[in-house]
Image (cartoon, rainbow, N blue to C red):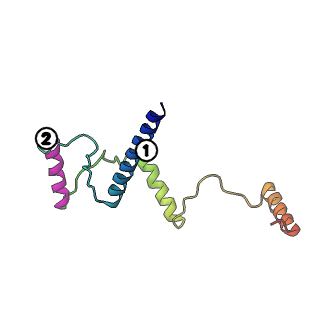
Amino acid sequence: MATKAKNKKAAEAAVNAQLEQVVEMVNAGEVNLPKKKPGRPVNPNSERQKRLAEKQALIDAGHVAKRGRPVNPDSARQKRLAEQAARAEANGGVVKRGRPVNPDSERQKRLRAQLEQMIAQGLI
């Protein structure tokens, strides 16, 4: 029984030593392992690939390729975006959103007083 265990440990040690040598060789770049490309293989003669190649040729030649759904300038969203851009341009590039603050309101006066009190106490 003892000899079987010794033989098993010796065999494991030999395998581990060989494995370490192989790992060192791979890390050193001495072994070139074949790399498999991920994903589905591409058939260059398929109709889709031909169509994509034609489209890329048009793009490379400087022709504008249509991509995606065309914009409808009369849609509600495009009108809203145009109005928002006009407001931003009128305000120096800043889009003001929400309700404007009234500096003379009771709440703003109370918040200003609290801020001044905190500054006076050295908390801020």
Residue 32 is tagged as none
Residue drawn at point x = 49 percent, y = 55 percent: 84
Residue drawn 19% across and 54% down? Answer: 56
19 left or right, relative to 114: left
Q: Write down the residue under mark 1.
A: 76
Q: Quadrant of residue 25?
A: bottom left
> Could you tell me the amino acid type at mark 1?
Ala
Q: Is residue 93 above or below residue 82?
A: below
Left or right position of 17 against 105: left
* Amino acid at pointer 2: Glu
Tell me residue 63's x, y (percent). 19, 58
Residue at disc 2, secondary structure? helix
Q: Which residue is mark 2?
A: 47
Above or below: residue 120 compared with residue 1: below
Does residue 34 belong to the magenta stretch? no
In the picture shown, does residue 122 fall above or below 31? below
Tell me: 25 left or right of 124. Answer: left
* Picture coordinates of residue 81, whole percent (x, y): 45, 52
User: Residue visible at 58% across and 58% down?
Assistant: 96
- Decide if residue 75 is on the left or right side of residue 34: right
Considering every residue shown, the one lying at the far top of the view is 1
Query: Which one is nearer the viewer's eye here, 108 or 25?
Result: 25
Please, what secondary structure does the residue beneath circle 1 have? helix
Instruction: Judge by depth and name the residue closer to the eye, 66 or 26.
Output: 26
Categorize mark 2 by other alpha carbons within 10 Å: few (<14), some (14-19), many (20+).
few
Q: Nearer the viewer, mark 2 or mark 1?
A: 2
Q: At which x and y percent is residue 104?
A: 77, 60
* Secondary structure predominantly adopted by residues drawn in magenta: helix
Q: Is residue 58 magenta?
A: yes
